[in-house]
Amino acid sequence: MLDHPVAVHSRLGHGSSFSVTVPRAEVAAATAAVSSPRPRGAFGGARVLCIDNDAVILDGMAALLRGWDCRVIGAWTIEEAVARLEDQHPDIAIVDYHLDGSATGLAALEALRARFGDVAAIVLTADHSEAAQDLITDRGYPLLYKPVKPAALRALLSRLVQLAQQPARTF
C-alpha cells in the first residue's frame, strides 16, 4: 500500500527473512511534525460506542478507532453500554447484529435511541442471509459484513460524521 520495496531471502533448512525498506524523514521535518499542533482529524474526538459480544473483536475495533482519534466506549451488552455512556450522547454507535442470547444490535440501537434520541449507527454482522440484511437495511442502518475492512469502515464513518456535522435543514 505504501509502495515500499519488500525483499525476501530464503535458505533451505535455515528459514526465511523478510525486509521492508522505509525511507527516512529528515530530522527537522520529523521534529516539526511532532511539535506542531496536530490538526483535528476527520474523527477528532468523536465518541464512538461499540457493542459486540466477542472480546477480541471489541478490542480490535477499539484499537482501530482510537488510532483514528475516536473516543471509544466498548460494551458487551446494551445495559453495559448505557451504564458506560452515563448521560453522554454517542456520536456514532457500531453494533454487532447478533449479540448473546436473543439480543440483537437492532434492539440495542432502539434502546439507545429511546435514551439519547437520534444516534448515527453502523451494524456489523457475519450473517450474510437475506433476512438479516433486509431487517437491518429496512430500518435504515448501514451494514458492513465481518470481517470488516478498515477502509470500508473509515469511509462509512467519514460519511456519517460529515452528515452529523451538517446543519439541520427546515423546509
Image: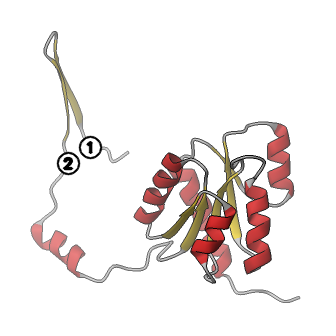
- 56 horizontally vs 89: left or right: left
Asked if 35 appears above or below 120 in the picture, the reply is: below
* Residue 15 place in picture, x, y as percent: 17, 18
Looking at the rendered structure, the kind of residue marked 2 is Val
Q: Going by the picture, which residue comes out furthest to the bottom?
A: 170
Looking at the rendered structure, the kind of residue marked 1 is His
**In contact (CB < 8 Å): disc 2 and disc 1:** yes
* Residue 163 place in picture, x, y as percent: 68, 74
Q: Which residue is the site of mark 2?
A: 22
Residue drawn at point x = 15 percent, y = 10 percent: 13
Viewer-closest of 81 and 44: 81
* Residue 137 place in picture, x, y as percent: 81, 53
* Residue 116 place in picture, x, y as percent: 73, 79
Q: Secondary structure at mark 2?
A: loop
- 71 horizontally vs 161: left or right: left
Q: Which residue is the site of mark 1?
A: 4
Residue drawn at point x = 24 percent, y = 38 percent: 5
Residue drawn at point x = 72 percent, y = 39 percent: 127
Q: Callout 2: 10 Å neighbours few (<14), some, many (20+)?
A: few
Asked if 68 appears above or below 88 in the picture, the reply is: above
Viewer-closest of 94 and 7: 94
